Amino acid sequence: LFDKSDVKKAMVFVDKAIDQYIRPNIIQNAEGRSPEIEPELFPPGKCIHFYSDGYSVSGSYAPCTYFDELDLARTMLSDHLIKRGYRRLFLELMREYHDDEHFAFDREEFDF
């Protein structure tokens, strides 16, 4: 598609542009910048924490501050691949919360 010499010319042009316009700003900003601030995780709204108790998956309301950091675990990926699916789990939690085994989401409001 492109001749090797054209690619080489383009790369030389890009390298020169990086050296001339971008690299000086990076070096300047690194010397005069303020210390980095750790990002703070704070999910908005009401939070429901789904968790495994070793036998099944359960859920409960949790304060948003509960999620202000991530805890890494070996089972993290499998914990988030809930076989029954988040919708069904959330529906079970809402039925328990409303004490109504026939509770259902309004399809127009929650199109799962």
Image (cartoon, helix red, strand yellow):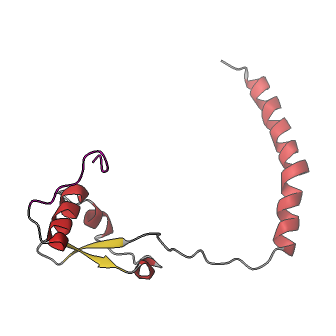
- Count of numbered badges drawn on the protein: 0
**Residue located 86% across and 43% down the image:** 17
Could you say where residue 71 lies in the image, as x and y percent from the top left? 40, 78
Whether 43 is drawn above or below 20: the answer is: below
Q: Is residue 110 magenta?
A: yes
Q: Quadrant of residue 73?
A: bottom left
State the residue in front, 40 or 94.
94
Q: Is residue 57 visible?
A: no
Q: Is residue 105 visible?
A: yes
State the residue in front, 47 or 24.
47
**Residue located 46% across and 70% down the image:** 43
Whether 14 is drawn above or below 51: the answer is: above
Q: Is residue 7 left or right of residue 43?
A: right
Numbered range of the magenta stretch: 102-112
Q: Is residue 7 left or right of residue 87?
A: right
**Residue located 88% across and 66% down the image:** 28
Could you say where residue 64 lies in the image, as x and y percent from the top left? 42, 77
Tell which residue pokes out farthest to the top in this image. 1
State the residue in front, 36 or 59.
59
Quadrant containing the N terminus is top right
State the residue in front, 77 or 38.
38
Q: Is residue 39 magenta?
A: no
Whether 112 is drawn above or below 72: the answer is: above
Could you say where residue 75 lies in the image, as x and y percent from the top left? 28, 70
Q: Quadrant of residue 16?
A: top right
> Of helix, strand and loop, which mostly describes the magenta segment?
loop
